[in-house]
Amino acid sequence: MSPSIRHPPSFRAAAVARVLRLRPSHASESAAVRAVAAGLGINAETLRGWVRQAEIDSGRREGLTTAARQELFRLRVELANARRALEKATAATTQLATTRPQDGTQGVDGAYS
């Protein structure tokens, strides 16, 4: 398996535009995608995914837009961070609640030492 290559957004947009421009001169969209992909030296399925995502982003196809995907990713990261913070706070609270003062004063949990 070859290493993953990140193509710049401008390259992706130009490749998608070329597929859309050449589509009428080919028997199918798949044929146009294969021709453009071969000309650019990229995987046809990668290009097909870019075309589909461009259609979603422009409203021509149903699906999750790029902006919505980015927001979903951001929210998942935020949720994971909040869960970690909650776990730390819960652990600290549990530790405080079970710690008894050595001087005989009343502890956090209401018990006397």
Image: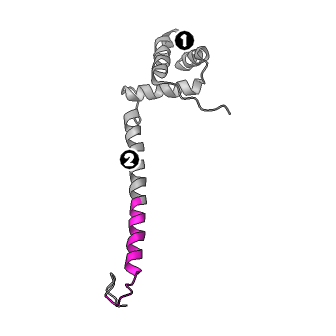
**Residue lying furthest front in this view?**
103
Residue 66 in the image, given as x and y percentages of width and height = 41, 33
Q: Is residue 82 left or right of residue 47?
A: left
What segment is highlighted magenta in the picture? 85-105
**Crowding at label 2, few (<14), some or many (≥20) Cα neighbours within 10 Å?**
few
Question: Which quarter of the rendering shows the N terminus?
Answer: top right
Mark carried by residue 26: 1
Camera-side mark, 2 or 1:
2
Residue shown at 40% from the left, 36% from the top: 64
In the picture provided, is 26 more to the left or to the right than 105?
Answer: right
Instruction: Tell me, for residue 75, which label it has, or none.
Output: 2
Q: Which residue appears at 55% of the width and 13% of the height?
A: 27
Secondary structure, mark 2, is helix
Q: Is residue 8 magenta?
A: no
Label 1, secondary structure: give it: loop
Amino acid type, label 2: Leu
Quadrant assignment, res 65? top left
Query: Measured along the vertical axis of the image, is residue 109 above or below residue 61?
Result: below
- Image location (x, y in percent) of residue 73: 42, 43
